[in-house]
């Protein structure tokens, strides 16, 4: 491994780093933002392992986004991704219970959210949005702002969130965005309206190994009073979950529904 690293360093040393042509910059910047956000999301919601999040990855993504924002202060999407990270990471302390289990946003203690990070994210997105047509990261930061500024789950502006997700879906063919839109539809218009959207997400091959579609279906079926189907969806989600705390949480949901229906 040491020899491989040495060889790689020699190759890198021989590469000339010429400035990018103006035409190349948007594509390169979009790739950098995408990678930074992937690092952040892996830290905020780990795909596998013993814990639900990896704070060191989220912190590193935020550090790099701050650096990029200092270098490119007039790039609205750079501002948007930093605002999105800050406002999302602000909830991290309330996302897990004493045993490391996930705590849904509706049940989180909002006094444990990081007010300083929320305020910084608010200032950033407030400055970025008026500069032109908002990009995907700015739209997501605006959604995070609606969550963070609501004093309670009941007071959340779900109709506005649903509209923002609808706009985001028009910009990108992202299956997770479609699933989040289904959740927003459920909260704004009821579970029956969201069920066909969630079923379509569950049938999307890009989410075939993801626990989230079945998790959403479990919540929708539960709200519709379809307990057996809800329990089945939570069991399927648990089988796909790759973090132990989430697997235990989903199995517990399925067990409670099964017992309540007996």
Image (cartoon, rainbow, N blue to C red):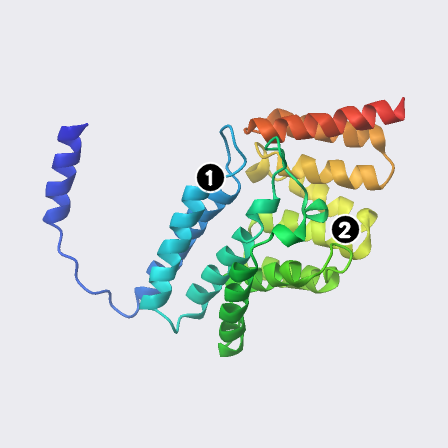
Q: Is residue 121 above or below residue 236?
A: below
Seen at 83% across and 47% down, the residue is 192
Q: Residue at x 51, y 59 (%)?
A: 117
Residue closest to the far right: 262
- In x, y percent, where is residue 93? 57, 46
Mark carried by residue 116: none
Q: Is residue 216 left or right of residue 176?
A: right
Question: Viewer-proximal residue, 70 or 222?
Answer: 70
Q: Report the number of numbered marks.
A: 2
Quarter residue 213 falls in: top right
Mark 2 nearby-residue class (10 Å; few <14, some 14–19, many ≥20)? many
Of helix, strand and loop, which one carries label 2? helix
- Indicate left or right for 62 with 6 as reference: right
In the structure shown, which secondary structural element does the residue marked by tag 1 occupy? loop
Kindly report the distance in space between the C-alpha atoms of the residues bearing marks 2 and 1: 29 Å
Q: Specify which label sits upstream in the sequence, 2 or 1.
A: 1
Q: Which residue is mark 2?
A: 186
Nearer to the camera, 27 or 118: 118
As rendered, which of 59 and 217 lies closer to the eye?
A: 59
Q: Is residue 86 left or right of residue 153?
A: left
Quadrant hosting residue 255: top right
Measured from the top left, where is residue 188 in percent x and y?
77, 57
Question: In the figure, 30 relative to 72: above or below?
Answer: above
Q: Can you identify the residue that label 1 sits on?
A: 54
Residue 86 drawn at (x, y percent): 50, 57
Q: Is residue 174 visible?
A: yes
């Amino acid at each position: 491994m040491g020899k491989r690293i040495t060889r790689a360093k020699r190759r890198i040393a021989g590469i000339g780093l010429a400035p990018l042509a103006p035409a190349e910059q948007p594509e390169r910047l979009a790739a950098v933002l995408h990678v930074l956000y992937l690092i952040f999301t892996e830290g905020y919601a780990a795909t596998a392992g013993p814990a639900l999040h990896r704070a060191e990855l989220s912190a590193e993504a935020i550090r790099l986004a701050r650096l990029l924002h200092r270098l490119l202060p007039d790039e609205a999407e750079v501002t948007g991704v930093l605002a999105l990270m800050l406002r999302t990471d602000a909830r991290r302390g309330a996302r897990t219970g004493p045993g490391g289990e996930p705590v849904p946003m509706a049940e989180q203690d909002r006094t444990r959210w990081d007010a300083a990070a929320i305020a910084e994210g608010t200032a950033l997105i407030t400055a970025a949005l008026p500069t032109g047509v908002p990009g995907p990261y700015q739209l997501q930061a605006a959604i995070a702002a609606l969550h963070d500024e609501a004093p309670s789950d009941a007071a959340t502006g779900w109709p506005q969130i649903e509209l923002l997700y609808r706009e985001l879906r028009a910009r990108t063919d992202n299956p997770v965005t479609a699933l989040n839109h289904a959740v927003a539809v459920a909260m704004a218009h009821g579970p029956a309206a969201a069920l066909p959207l969630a079923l379509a997400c569950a049938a999307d091959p890009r989410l075939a190994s993801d626990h989230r579609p079945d998790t959403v279906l479990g919540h929708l079926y539960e709200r519709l009073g379809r307990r057996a189907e809800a329990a089945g969806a939570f069991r399927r989600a648990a089988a796909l979950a790759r973090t132990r705390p989430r697997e235990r949480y989903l199995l517990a949901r399925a067990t409670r529904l099964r017992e309540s229906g007996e």
